[in-house]
């Protein structure tokens, strides 16, 4: 027998599986129904109605038109919507300022610099972190006036701000400082900003005249620093001329009264670099009635001569400061301050630009702002037909005795330092022998003599 006959060919045997052991029923049932459901038949009958078809076409057309107008809306409207969304939803983290919608600007590499970087350069010597500053948190609806007030306040001073806006009736650049007890992302900060929005929106005069710039105080900040806030209020002012004004006032003149024909030469002198002082009158003692006072020049002269009010210059008794009540009473035009002293800190008007900024090494030292302006060559003229009224109960500053002692010591050194600085600057620019350097020579001699550095 041959080998092939002894070994039958191998046949592949398929393993038994579930499908082979239990084959499915091959008779497939058709699951598709041949009749429409009742709901589909109802839709067909509804669509057969001409009215329904017309309504559907109108809905599609309206949707297309709405989308078209939204896409073609102006950039200002889009920016406004984004700004509202930012105010309502933007977190208060340290980098949130960089997400503010940027305006359309001409092409420039400088536009790539974010706000935080710009502020950090502008205030490189400031103790405040620049990313805590929110400029133009609210913007006034009225256009900027020629002279604008710059002021600093707290959240509890909104009523005083409204009173100022009603009396001034012109542009106000206000910096409001808000405490953040538990950091910038705390619920306390959110509540404070919500309260600020309510206060602003429920007081129409604020929305008309006042630009609000918010400063969120860094965590564990123990004192409000007014010097830096004064600089911010001036920096963000939209007016060409600024009046540096405290928030706590009883009365101040309107913007229109300062720009009437009788003050036609005011702007020329301001543009030349000079400054104008708005004299401040106050009551002579505490616990007196402060809700009645004169608001015209003749009435004020009568009250001061009778001892019911006086011309206020901090660091001096009433009527004894550099503003000089005797000169004001007899003046028929703005007059020059001839007895300047480095403690002098009045309400004054300057151009927004071309003047030194307030020194931020101090917490609250308004005379330091005036001092550098004076050394820079500005003459101070007192307005004879305008004034401000305060109660006389406001302190010069709110420092403790220890803080005031330290600041006074710093200010003495600062006085000599600035004398040397401006003398060197004027010498390098070749103007030391001109009239612009007369104030530097005057103050340096007084400072060096007082500190017994030289004998003159």
Image: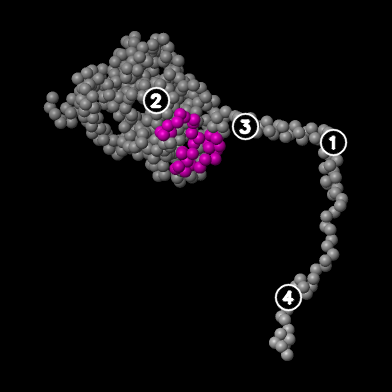
Mark 1 → mark 4, Cα distance in angstroms: 63 Å
- Which residue matches tag 1? 49
Density class for disc 2 (Cα within 10 Å; few <14, some 14-19, many ≥20) is: many
Q: Is residue 145 magenta?
A: no
For image coordinates 23% across by 27% down, the residue present is 425
Query: What are the residue bounds of the magenta stretch?
Result: 82-111
The quarter of the rendered structure image containing the C terminus is top left
Which badge, 4 or 3, is on the more N-terminal residue? 4
Mark 1 secondary-structure assignment: loop
Q: Give the alpha-carbon distance from disc 2 to disc 3, as whole Å.
A: 44 Å
Residue plotted at (68% across, 31% down): 65
Q: What is the number of the mark on residue 70?
A: 3
Q: Residues within 10 Å of mark 1 (few under 14, many from 20)?
A: few
Which image quarter: residue 356?
top left
Question: Which mark sits nearer the N-terminus, 4 or 2?
Answer: 4
Residue 112 at x, y percent in the picture: 43, 36
For marks 2 and 1, give the CA distance.
Answer: 73 Å
Q: Secondary structure at mark 2?
A: loop
């Amino acid at each position: 027998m041959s080998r092939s006959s002894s070994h039958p060919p191998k046949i592949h045997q398929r393993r038994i599986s579930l499908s082979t052991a239990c084959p499915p029923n091959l008779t497939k049932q058709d699951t598709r129904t041949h009749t429409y459901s009742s709901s589909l038949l109802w839709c067909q009958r509804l669509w057969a109605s001409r009215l329904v078809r017309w309504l559907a076409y109108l809905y599609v057309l309206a949707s297309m038109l709405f989308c078209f107008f939204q896409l073609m809306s102006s950039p200002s409207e889009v920016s406004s919507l984004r700004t509202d969304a930012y105010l309502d939803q933007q977190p208060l983290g340290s980098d949130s300022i960089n997400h503010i919608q940027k305006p359309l600007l001409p092409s420039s590499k400088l536009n790539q610099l974010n706000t935080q970087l710009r502020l950090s350069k502008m205030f490189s010597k400031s103790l405040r972190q620049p990313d805590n500053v929110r400029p133009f948190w609210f913007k006034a609806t009225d256009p900027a006036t020629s002279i604008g007030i710059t002021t600093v306040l707290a959240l509890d001073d909104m009523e005083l701000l409204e009173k100022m806006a009603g009396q001034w009736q012109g542009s106000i650049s206000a910096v409001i400082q808000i405490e953040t007890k538990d950091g910038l992302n705390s619920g306390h900060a959110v509540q404070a900003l919500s309260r600020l929005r309510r206060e602003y929106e429920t007081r129409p005069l604020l929305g008309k005249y006042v630009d609000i710039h918010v400063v969120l105080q860094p965590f564990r900040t123990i004192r409000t620093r007014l010097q830096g806030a004064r600089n911010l209020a001036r920096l963000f002012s939209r007016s060409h001329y600024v009046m540096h004004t405290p928030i706590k006032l009883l009365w101040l003149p309107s913007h229109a009264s300062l720009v009437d024909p009788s003050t036609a030469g005011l702007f020329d002198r301001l543009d030349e670099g000079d400054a104008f002082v708005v004299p401040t009158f106050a009551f002579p003692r505490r616990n007196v009635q402060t809700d009645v006072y004169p608001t015209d020049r003749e009435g004020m002269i009568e009250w001061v001569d009778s001892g019911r009010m006086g011309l206020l210059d901090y660091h001096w008794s009433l009527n004894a400061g550099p503003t000089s009540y005797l000169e004001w009473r007899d003046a028929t035009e703005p007059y020059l301050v001839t007895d300047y002293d480095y403690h002098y800190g009045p309400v004054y008007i300057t151009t927004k630009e071309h003047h030194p900024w307030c020194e931020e090494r101090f917490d609250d030292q308004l005379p330091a702002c005036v001092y550098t302006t004076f050394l820079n060559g500005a003459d101070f003229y007192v307005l004879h037909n305008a004034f401000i009224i305060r109660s006389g109960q406001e302190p010069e500053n709110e420092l403790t005795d220890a803080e005031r002692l330290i600041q006074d010591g710093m200010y003495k050194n600062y006085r000599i330092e600035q004398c040397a600085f401006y003398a060197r600057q004027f010498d390098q620019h070749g103007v030391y022998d001109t009239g612009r350097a007369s104030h530097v020579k005057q103050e340096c001699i007084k400072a060096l003599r007082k500190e017994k550095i030289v004998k003159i």
